[in-house]
């Protein structure tokens, strides 16, 4: 069984938006902050797993709908607000 082919497409959608959101919001864009925001956002979004290239293409088409994009951006913003209020880092 080859489980490496199992992929959560929601990760790609969040990663595609994360740096734009961080720079627009003025939050630190270091790897730690970007990963913290990504993890918080992904924990509140439904996973969208695919196992093939055809599934990936279908999922991209489905998730390009505006309501899905709005949900991703809203969760990223919520996560940014949480990360902003934590203790500062080095």
Image: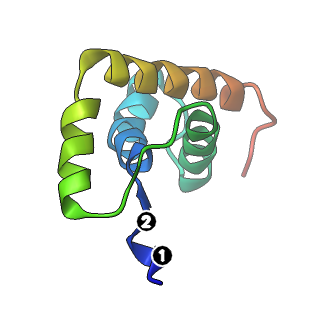
Q: Is residue 69 left or right of residue 58?
A: right
Question: Which residue is under mark 1?
Answer: 3
Q: Position of residue 43 (x, y in %)?
A: 63, 38
Which residue does the image show at 29% across and 32% down from the upper left?
63
Q: Cα distance, mark 2 to mark 1?
A: 6 Å
Q: Are marks 2 and 1 in contact (CB under 8 Å)?
A: yes
**Which quadrant of the view contains residue 14?**
top left
Q: Is residue 58 left or right of residue 68?
A: left
Label 2: few (<14), some or many (≥20) within 10 Å? few
Farthest-out residue, right: 87
Q: Position of residue 81 (x, y in %)?
A: 64, 21
Identify the element where label 1 is drawn: helix
Query: Is residue 33 shown above or below 72?
Result: below
Which residue does the image show at 67% across and 27% down from the upper left?
84
Query: Is residue 25 shown above or below 47?
Result: above
Mark seen at residue 62? none
Identify the element where label 2 is drawn: loop
Query: In the image shown, does 45 or 39 lie closer to the viewer?
Result: 45
Label 1: few (<14), some or many (≥20) within 10 Å? few
Question: Which residue is under mark 2?
Answer: 6
Farthest-out residue, front: 1
Q: Position of residue 56 (x, y in %)?
A: 25, 53
**Which quadrant of the view contains residue 65?**
top left
Which residue does the image show at 54% across and 54% down from the upper left?
31
**Which quadrant of the view contains residue 38?**
top right
Q: Position of residue 80 (x, y in %)?
A: 59, 27
Image color mode: rainbow
């Amino acid at each position: 069984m080859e489980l490496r082919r199992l992929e959560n497409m929601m990760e790609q959608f969040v990663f595609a938006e994360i740096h734009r959101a961080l720079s627009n919001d003025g939050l630190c864009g270091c790897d730690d902050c970007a990963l913290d925001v990504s993890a918080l956002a992904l924990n509140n979004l439904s996973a969208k797993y695919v196992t093939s290239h055809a599934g990936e293409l279908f999922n991209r088409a489905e998730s390009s709908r505006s309501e899905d994009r709005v949900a991703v951006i809203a969760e990223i913003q919520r996560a940014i607000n949480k990360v902003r209020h934590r203790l500062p880092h080095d």
